[in-house]
Amino acid sequence: MIKPYYEEPGITIYHGDCREILPQLEPVDLVLTDPPYDFESKGGGFYGNWHGAGHEARTYINNLDSLKCCSFDPEDVLKMLPAQYGYFCCNKSLVSKYINFAENNNLLFDIHVLHKSNPIPAKNSHFLHDIEYIVMVRPSGSFFNPNSSHSNYSKVYSSSCRSDNYHPAQKPIGLMKKYIEVSCPISGTVLDPFMGSGTTLRAAKDLERKAIGIEIEEKYCEIAVERLRQEVLAL
């Protein structure tokens, strides 16, 4: 087994490619992650619309390139996961791939939305890019907490876009807490194979769940460790 990059009671981080680490893990209760998207590098897609659109846009594109977001097939990872219960953030072009995986494996699925209340106002003959999709996949009869707060059962989560995030694709910690509260038992373990800056792990720690994170870029492993060491709620 690969040596952990970081460990504390109930929390483990691995630095490396999740495709090499996942086969070594024991079963977990929930997968909660924001894998790479599959942006179009040219043409009329979201990714293409940003080229040449100013410094902020070019910085965003460079971040996407560094995260290898332009050629990702989720099935390569889905078939390796140590749980069939998960929430996967994605864009429009990947929704069908997650649904096909669910249907081909006799799993239930649903589609949720992360609504950005202050999207960058770049239209280019398209509607604003103010939503991201989240596909839920789970086996029939899997754990589902009926006693969480009412707002946690909405399929829409609204949040403003932040410019001070630790990671260019960082999701709101409240979103991750919502899914952990509803879909992971108190004694359970959450896995994030595309950990980024550790939002899922921080949310799990705050909610007294165990968590495992995998991240291929060491600089984000370092950031995640610092967030986990904070006594107060991290961003």
Image (tube, grey):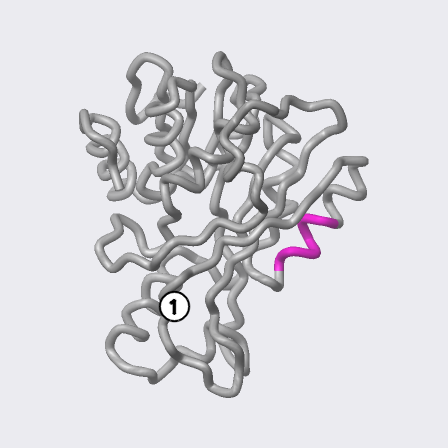
Number of numbered labels in the structure image: 1
The percent coordinates of residue 7 (x first, y second) are 30, 19
The percent coordinates of residue 106 (x first, y second) are 81, 36
Q: Is residue 24 above or below residue 65?
A: above
Name the residue at 44% across, 58% down.
68
Q: Is residue 200 magenta?
A: no
Q: Seen from this angle, which residue lies furthest front?
A: 150
Nearest the eye: 62 or 128: 128
To which residue does mark 1 refer? 119
Name the residue at 23% across, 33% down.
227
- Which kind of residue does numbered mark 1 sit on? Pro
Name the residue at 49% across, 48% down.
35
Q: Helix, strand or loop at disc 1?
A: loop
Q: Quadrant of the C terminus?
A: top left
Nearest the eye: 149 or 226: 149
Question: Which quadrant would residue 58 be assigned to in this image?
Answer: bottom left
Q: Is residue 97 magenta?
A: yes
Question: Which quadrant would residue 223 be assigned to in this image?
Answer: top left
The percent coordinates of residue 98 (x first, y second) are 67, 48
Magenta highlight: main SS: helix
Classify residue 72 as left or right of residue 203: right
Highlighted magenta segment, given as a residue range: 94-99
Name the residue at 48% across, 26% down.
190
Mark 1 Cα-neighbour bin, 10 Å: few <14, some 14–19, many ≥20: some
Question: Which quadrant would residue 91 be assigned to in this image?
Answer: bottom right
Classify residue 54 as left or right of residue 100: left
Q: Quadrant of the N terminus?
A: top left
